[in-house]
Every structure is written in C-alpha cells, then in structure tokens.
Image (cartoon, rainbow, N blue to C red):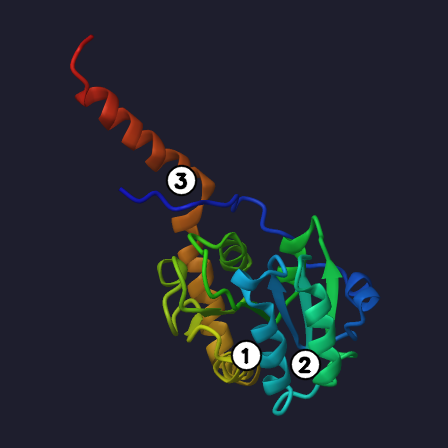
Amino acid sequence: RVVPSGVPLAKPAAPASVELLESFGVPRGAPLAVLVASLSEAKDPLTFVRAIAVARREVPALHALLVGDGPLRDALESEISVLGLGGFVHLTGFRTDPESLEAAASVVVLTSKSLEGTPGVLLDALAVGVPIVATNVGGVPEVIEHEVSGLIVPIGDAEAVGHAIVRVLRDAPLASRLSAGGRARAPLFSIENTVDRTMEVYRELLASEAPR
C-alpha cells in the first residue's frame, strides 16, 4: 500500500506581499521563478541557477528566489556572480513562510536529482495553482502529470529546465491549463486523505489479527 503525503487544503497560503518580494530585490510585476529547497547536492540548486540564465535569454525580465539554506550557499553565490545573475537570482535564506513565496510565483521549480519521495513543495504548489517545472526524480511523476498539472524535465539538464520555464511564462494557455490541472489534482494530496487512507490500513491489519 502507498499512502501519499498530504497538506492542508482548506486555507491555501496567501501570496507574499509585493513589499516582501521587493525587499529581496524582485521588482513589482516581474515574472518570478521560485525554488524552495535545502541548498544541498541532492536538491541540485546549481542547475536551477543555470536554468534561470537559460530562461533569461528569452525572458530577460525574469527574477528567481532560492528559498532555503545549506552547504552549497557559497558555491551558488559564486555561480550567480559568474553568470551575471547578481541582480536577478536572490537567496532568501531559511524562511518559515515558503508557501507564501510559492503562491506569489509565476512558476515553482524543483531541480532535485535524488532523495525525493513525495515533495511537499510541489503539493503546496498544486494547492495554490502555481504551474510547476520539476525533474523526473523519485515520486515527482506520482505528484504531477506531465503537460497536465506540471512539466517534467530530465535531471541535471539546465537547458531543459530553462526552456520549460520559458514555456510556462510565454504560453498563457499552457500556464492556465497547468494551474487548473494542479488545483484539480491537489485533493489527492489533502491531509484528510492521508489520514483516512492511513486509518484504513490500520483497520485492515487489526481486523485480520487472530484473537490473543
């Protein structure tokens, strides 16, 4: 039996305020890609930074937030500088409000290359209807359906991630379809569904036990 993780859906996160985004360096009205992850090898945030460089060839107004902290922070700051993205990719550090930053995004991105079961950040994105671009790792294909509730791209391929981001930003009907598909899929990952299905397993096990 597989019981998926769940998130509360009754009160989806409100988008972060314009003022908060501006405090990170994101101009009012700029298209925004958001990655919420530990800055670690498993999450591969360097591919995200390189993908933003790719995407900005076609969408030069694009900004990005890296939400989280970890051992790769110095390497990321160096890569951001080398790629000339200092004014466009912003490291927020650890935050307690990542869902609100996702809700304010034009696209939520996940570039993990390992250690993904059911990515909670994608469940949050489904709940608020923000289009998703994610690598084909772990449980990602179980969370989103390619071209229906998100776009799935190869692991470690910055060009593919960047082009997928551009598709979402430049193709309004696609973005609308992915948003609607995400909202429709979100109830599968409600916390209530997780609890109910877990209880079903316990009841079956208890009912099948021989009397002691």
Residue at the spot x=37%, y=71% of the render?
146
Residue at the spot x=40%, y=40% of the render?
194
Instruction: Locate residue 81 relative to residue 45 in the image: left or right.
Output: right
* Local SS, label 3: helix
How far is mark 1 from mark 2, CA to CA?
10 Å
Quarter of the image where one finds residue 70: bottom right
Q: Give above or below for 55 relative to 175.
A: below
Q: Which mark is residue 165?
A: 1
Instruction: Locate residue 168 relative to residue 23 in the image: left or right.
Output: left
Instruction: Locate residue 30 relative to residue 202 in the image: left or right.
Output: right
Instruction: Write down the residue under mark 2.
Output: 62
Of 195 and 113, nearer the camera is 113
* Local SS, label 1: helix
The three-letter code of the residue at mark 3 reads Thr
Rendered location of residue 16, percent (x, y): 72, 59
Q: Which mark is residue 194?
A: 3
Rendered location of residue 208, percent (x, y): 17, 22
Rendered location of residue 153, percent (x, y): 43, 75
Q: Earlier in the sequence, mark 2 or mark 3?
A: 2
Outermost residue on the bottom side: it is 57
Residue at the spot x=43%, y=45% of the render?
5
Q: Earlier in the sequence, mark 1 or mark 2?
A: 2
The three-letter code of the residue at mark 2 reads Leu
Q: Give above or below for 7 relative to 88.
A: above
Q: Which mark is residue 100?
A: none
Q: Residues within 10 Å of mark 2 (few under 14, many from 20)?
A: many
* Local SS, label 2: loop
The C terminus lies in quadrant: top left
Q: Give above or below for 153 relative to 24.
A: below
The three-letter code of the residue at mark 1 reads Ile
